[in-house]
Image (spheres, rainbow, N blue to C red):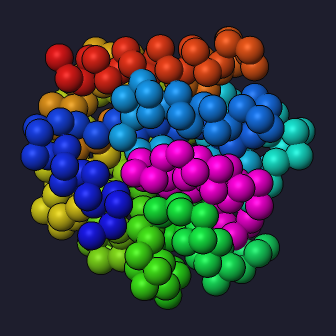
Amino acid sequence: MSKIAATFSALKAHNKTALVTFITAGDPGRESTVPLMHALVAGGADIIELGVPFSDPMAEGPVIQRACERALANGVGIKDVFDYVAEFRKTNQTTPVVLMGYANPIERIGAKAFIAQSVAVGADGAIVVDYPPEECEEFAAAMRAAELDLIFLLAPTSTEKRIEQVAKVGGGFSYYVSLKGVTGAGNIDTVDVAKRLQAIRKHVKLPVGVGFGIRDGATARAVAEVADAVVIGSRIIQEIETAGKDGAVAAVQAFTTSIRTALDA
């Protein structure tokens, strides 16, 4: 059982919803990432998505785009991301870490090197936004062989055929994007989400997390009624932007705590 699967199993046993949190590696500073990862855990995060900075993050709204720009300006690349995970693992061996980003950085170092490095530093899986599930069965198989989970996105526009393919090749959990558009846009319709998850679960037996549009405890709690995990990214990045380097760690921990409290209420 992967670390991600074990996390979901343990939470289910206690009737709890997973809190999945996202930050961009290297934002707001090179030395900020590992302290922020620990702050997320201290605030109650169950899984960390660590964004790999990329110059053209096409699925992201302006908030995460700016985070990528700041990280790239700080000179942070995929090798640094691996270093951050290794540093985090020195004191936390239990919280799953998922590397989230785009195909280009992986293609540059090669899939085999990406998988080998992920295993070496203690990462648990990846979300590659622009890897279509129909076109990366070989990569998914190689990830599984290394006991890493390759997590795929599903959207309101996903066809039944796409859902079936994600069920076939995906691992860890499936990430349902609750809104049409980019991250951080719009407000979530929990009634519509419930209907879509029902359709997804006809094929996908993995836990299903819901993200995009979750900005506060009340919305997180409403989503938790129908989902196995609540995923929050842009809202956390906004906390980082507002607080700046000096206040980011405290602000992120406080915000994460507020969401965890709402989920457990």
In the image, is residue 13 above or below residue 99? Answer: above
Residue 227 locus on image (x, y percent): 22, 41
Give the quarter of the figure containing the N terminus.
bottom left
Disc tally is 0
In the image, is residue 256 above or below residue 22? Answer: above
Residue 235 locus on image (x, y percent): 52, 23
Task: Give residue 16's quadrant in the image.
Answer: top left
Residue at 47%, 14% in the rendered image = 254
Residue 186 is inside the magenta segment: no
48 with respect to 54 (left or right): left
Q: Residue furthest front?
A: 91
Residue 57 locus on image (x, y percent): 69, 48
Task: Give residue 62's quadrant in the image.
Answer: top right
Residue at 77%, 54% in the rendered image = 80
In the image, is residue 9 above or below residue 134? Answer: above
Give the quarter of the figure containing the C terminus.
top left
2 with respect to 128 (left or right): left
Residue 252 locus on image (x, y percent): 54, 21
| Foreground of the two, 218 or 40 | 40
| Foreground of the two, 103 or 86 | 86
Residue 69 in view in this figure:
no
Task: Give residue 234's quadrant in the image.
Answer: top right
| Foreground of the two, 85 or 105 | 85
In the image, is residue 172 above or below residue 148? Answer: above
Q: Which residues are magenta?
A: 79-106
Residue 32 in view in this figure:
yes
Residue at 36%, 76% in the rendered image = 169
198 with respect to 50 (left or right): left
Residue at 37%, 15% in the rendered image = 258
